[in-house]
Image (cartoon, rainbow, N blue to C red):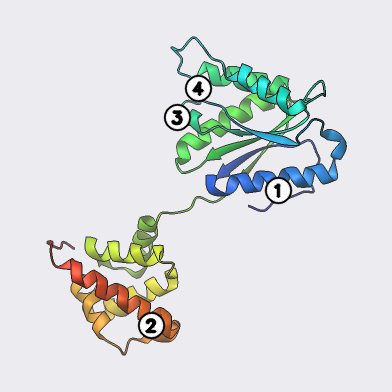
């Protein structure tokens, strides 16, 4: 995710995207803000991470705010109050955006915003739940006239979704066996352009319904034009993948 440092501090953010990269993005933003505004940070640490754990409505013991205060006190050291960023993992509240404990937590964070700045981490794999949670955070902060920006990373499609999209683009219908093989190619980091070219070339000879036999026949054809789109090593790796699949393919019934 690209970080824009031209925005004025203080800045609260919601990182909406892939959890695998969010921690690094948060670290980058915090380090840049520390360089630009060192006077805004006080304590033993510039930031700390905290998972705001979900508590069900029927549970009378909502202790997350006390736990957060304790963590902040440790980060403050000998200072009266911690000043810096708290990186908040909000994902256990996905599908619980309208519950009272979440509202209580957000109001508390809003009240502490003079000292604490926040980076909320939200996984956007479930788009509907993610947007509902982001909307709840923003509504509480905007009500308190507190700036909070959303930095959204595009949702990454699964290999299955990518294969379905490529089949649609090429106007072909593939059997389950073939789709699984194409997903495997993407997982092996063959480029989508190669998979698309593979579908295009096979469909010209086998028609728009592509079965495992069509893939096997392609593997037996050493004169494929696709080899000119790849290095010899990559092409041999593709053929080896087809051969490996061929050895296991004919145990089950195929449907297209």
Residue 239: x and y, percent?
31, 79
Q: Which residue is rendered at x = 42% and y = 85% of the image?
A: 232
Q: Can you name the residue that lies furthest to the bottom here?
A: 223
- Disc 2 from disc 3: Cα separation: 46 Å
- Where is residue 55 drawn, in percent x and y? 48, 20
Query: Is the C-beta separation of discs 1 and 4 under 8 Å?
Result: no
Mark on residue 95? 3
* Position above or below: 71 against 221: above
Q: Secondary structure at mark 4?
A: loop
Q: Position of 179 compared to 35: left or right?
A: left
Q: Which residue was labeled with disc 2?
A: 226
Which secondary structure lies at badge 1? helix
Residue 34: image x %, image y %? Answer: 80, 42
Badge 4 vs badge 3, beta-carbon distance below 8 Å = no
Q: CA distance from mark 1 to mark 4?
A: 31 Å
Distance of mark 1 from mark 2, alpha carbons?
Answer: 41 Å
Judge whether 44 appears above or below 183 on screen: above
Q: Which residue is mark 4?
A: 98
Q: CA distance from mark 1 to mark 3?
A: 29 Å
């Amino acid at each position: 995710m690209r970080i824009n440092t031209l925005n004025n501090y203080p800045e609260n953010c919601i990182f909406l995207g892939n959890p695998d990269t969010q921690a690094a993005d948060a670290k980058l933003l915090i380090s840049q803000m520390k360089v630009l505004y060192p006077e805004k940070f006080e304590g033993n640490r510039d930031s700390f991470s905290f998972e705001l754990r979900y508590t069900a409505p029927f549970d009378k013991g909502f202790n997350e705010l006390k736990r957060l205060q304790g963590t902040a006190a440790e980060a403050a050291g000998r200072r009266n109050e911690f000043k810096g960023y708290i990186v908040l993992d909000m994902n256990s509240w996905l599908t619980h955006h309208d519950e009272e404990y979440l509202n209580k937590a957000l109001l508390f964070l809003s009240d502490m915003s003079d000292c604490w700045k926040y980076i909320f981490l939200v996984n956007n794999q479930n788009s509907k739940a993610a947007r509902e949670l982001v909307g709840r955070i923003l509504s509480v902060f905007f009500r308190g006239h507190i700036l909070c920006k959303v930095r959204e990373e595009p949702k990454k499609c699964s290999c299955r979704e990518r294969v379905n999209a490529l089949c649609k683009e090429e106007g072909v219908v593939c059997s389950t066996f073939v789709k699984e093989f194409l997903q495997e190619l993407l997982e092996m980091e063959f480029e989508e352009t190669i998979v698309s070219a593979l579908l295009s070339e096979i469909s010209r000879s086998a028609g728009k319904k592509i079965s495992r036999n069509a893939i096997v026949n392609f593997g037996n054809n050493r004169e494929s034009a696709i080899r000119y789109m790849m290095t010899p090593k990559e092409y041999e790796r593709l053929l080896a993948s087809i051969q490996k699949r061929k050895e296991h393919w004919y145990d089950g019934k195929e449907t297209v």
